[in-house]
Structures are given as C-alpha cells and as structure tokens.
Image (spheres, grey):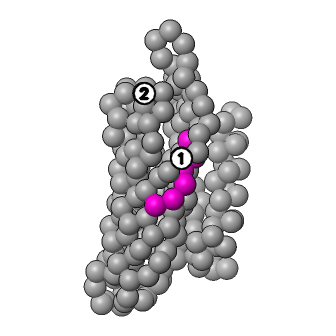
Amino acid sequence: MVFRRTLLGLTALVALAAPALAQQSYLGASVGSFFPSSSALRDKLGDNWLSYGPTSVRIDSSRRQRVTSDWQAFSKSKDGNKVFMLSLSGGILYPLGDQMSTRPYAAARAGLGYIDYAINVTGGRESGKRFGPTGNVEVGVNIGERLNLHARYDLFPSYAGFNFSGFSIALQYGITRF
C-alpha cells in the first residue's frame, strides 16, 4: 500500500512539474502497456504491465524537427515483487508528414532514469533505488489537438541481474490546458 501511495504521489508530482520541464500544454490521462525485454523480469512480474495515470500532453503543429522533452513512468507489483521506473529525457522530434489533423512523428531521446525495485530471488531478495542513464526511441501520431498514440522502446540499465528495458504502447488524452 505504501508503494502504491508513493507511486501515485511521485507520478502526480512529475505530472505537475512536467510543464516546466517539458513545456507541455495539457494535463491529461494516459493508458498503456509496458512489455519488459528481460525474461527474468517477465518471470517475476509478468509479460504485460498495464499502466495508467496522469500525464502531460503537448500536441504541436510544427512541421520542422525540434528539441523536445518527455517523461514516462512504469510500475508493477506481483507476488511480493515490486518495480517502479521513471524516465526523464530530452532529444529530437521529427515530424513525418504535413497533415494538420493527423501528424505522425518519430523521436529519439536520452536522459536520467530512476528505478526502485524489490524482487525475490533464490536465497533472498534483491532491492535498490538507483539513478542511471536512460534513452528511448518513439514513433507516434498526434490526432487533433489533444490525442496522442505512441509506441516506444525505453532503454534502462541492468541491476542485480535484471534488465529493466522494454517496449511500451500508450494512448494519451489532454484534458485541461495550462
């Protein structure tokens, strides 16, 4: 229960801080799935981690490449095993078309990641709270002014024999402009 409250609080804090960091335009909601690359992590926590919560959404009609920033959080708890991962990154976004209402794009970013994990292993438990480098590549489409659908691969470091990298897909909707 404490883990979930901490996760919710940290996610809300990041969502509120994201406008200053990422220059986002909307506070909204996101729903998606994370698929860990590591078979060891999948064995302990499952193949598919449902994610949902607050997010920041910026839909930009620019037709030129630009510098962008992003944040993404994933968490999972199962059978006493817990993982929370947060990625704060910046990089380049490349528009892939000229259309006004539906705008596909690709992005590549690098930044700082945070991982909080506690995983049962043979003979004990591996746990830690770590900061390290992170990166991601993303392809997506902005639909209208508030809707974003994207797929991405997040690269995180390995700790205690677990690789925390993985693929995700998410749908985001901007609810209120700020």
Q: Is residue 58 left or right of residue 92?
A: right
Let me know if residue 49 appears in the view: no
Q: Is residue 80 above or below residue 21?
A: above
Q: Is residue 134 above or below residue 84?
A: below
Q: Residues within 10 Å of mark 1 (few under 14, many from 20)?
A: few
Magenta-span inclusion, residue 86: no
Q: How many marks?
A: 2
Residue 135 in percent (x, y) is at: 43, 56
Element at label 2 = loop
Residue 126 in percent (x, y) is at: 54, 23
At horizontal 59% and vertical 40% (from top left) the residue drawn is 130
Task: Please tell me which of labels 2 and 1 falls first in the chain.
Answer: 1
Q: Which of 59 and 117 lies nearest the eye of the viewer?
A: 117
To which residue does mark 2 refer?
161
Specify the amino acid type for callout 2.
Gly
To which residue does mark 1 refer?
132
The C terminus appears in which quarter of the rendering? bottom right
Q: Is residue 54 above or below residue 23?
A: above
Residue 44 in percent (x, y) is at: 43, 26
Query: Looking at the rendered structure, which numbered label has been put on residue 72?
Result: none
Q: Which residue ends up furthest to the left in the rendered image?
A: 97
At horizontal 51% and vertical 19% (from top left) the residue drawn is 120
At horizontal 51% and vertical 59% (from top left) the residue drawn is 111
Magenta stretch in the rendered image: 110-115
Let me know if residue 94 appears in the view: yes
